[in-house]
Image: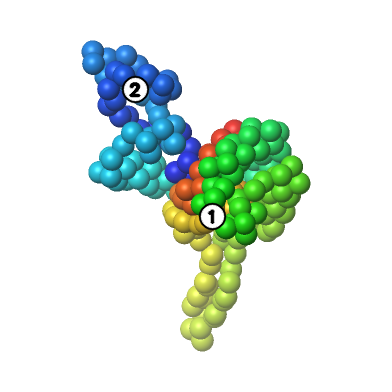
Amino acid sequence: WVSSHQHLNVTYLLTAEESDALHFREGENTRVGWLPADRLLELTNEWQMDEVYTKLLERARGARGAMALADGETKDRALLAMAEELEADTAPILAANALDLEGARGRISEVMLDRLALSPDRIAGMAKGIREVAALPDPVGAVLSRVERPNGLVIEKTAVPMGVIAIIYESRPNVTSDAAALALKAGSACVLRCGKEAHRSAAAIVSALCRG
C-alpha cells in the first residue's frame, strides 16, 4: 500500500541553493534525489504536483497484484507488525502531531482541533484497531451468494480485492491507520490523502506502518 504522505520515491530537479532537502545526489547545477512530502509541497508548483500524484498512483497500481494474491496469514502478520511499530513510534508521532496542532490553532475550530489531537491512549487505540482488523476473517475469496441452475450450472458471487483504493479524509490522523489496515486486509493497495492540517501526523504514522 502507498500513502501520499510518505517520502515519495520520485525524482526531481532542484536548484543548488535548496540544500536542506534530504538524500540528494550532487549534479552540476542541480541535486537529484528524494524529497519529504512537506518540503515537496513548498517547492513544487501545480504541474509538478500532478506528476507526483500520477507517479504515486502508478506505484499503487503496480502493487495491486501482490496485494491481491497475498494470503490471509501474510496479511495478518503484516497488520500485527504495523500495530507494534505504531505503538513503538508513539513519541515521534506525538511530536509531529504537536507541530500540526500548533500550526492549526486559530485556523480551525476547537472541535476540529480535538479530532486532530493525538495522545498515547489514542495511538494505543489505533494499534488496537489494527489488531482487531487482523482478527477478522479474510474477506478475499468469500462466497457471498451461490445459485445452482436446473441444468447444474453453479453461479457464485465471490468477494475480490478492488485493486487500488484512493481515500481523501479530513484532518483526523487516526483514519490513516484505520484506512490502511482495512485496505490491506481486503487485499488492495491504497493511496491516502488527509487534510492539510494533519500532514505531519499522517507522515509519522505512515512511517511507522511501513516499517511494520
Residue 101: image quadrant is top right
Q: Position of residue 48 (x, y in %)?
A: 28, 40
Mark sitting on residue 108? 1
The x, y position of residue 135, in whole percent, is 72, 53
Q: Quadrant of the C terminus?
A: top right
**Secondary structure type for disc 2:** loop
Label 1: few (<14), some or many (≥20) within 10 Å? few
Q: Amino acid at mark 2?
A: Glu
Label of residue 18 in the image: 2
Q: Position of residue 153 (x, y in %)?
A: 49, 78
Q: CA distance from mark 1 to mark 2?
A: 31 Å
> Which secondary structure, mark 1?
loop
Closer to the camera in the image, 201 or 117: 117
Per the rendering, the mark at residue 126 is: none
Viewer-nearest residue: 122 or 136: 122
Could you tell me if residue 7 is visible in this image? yes
For residue 69, above or below residue 32: below
Marked residue nearer the N-terminal end (1 or 2): 2
Please, is residue 45 above or below residue 116 in the view? above
Residue, x 27% and y 22% (percent of image)?
Answer: 15
* Residue at the image point whose x is 71% and y is 48% from the top: 122
| Residue drawn at (38%, 43%) of the image | 56
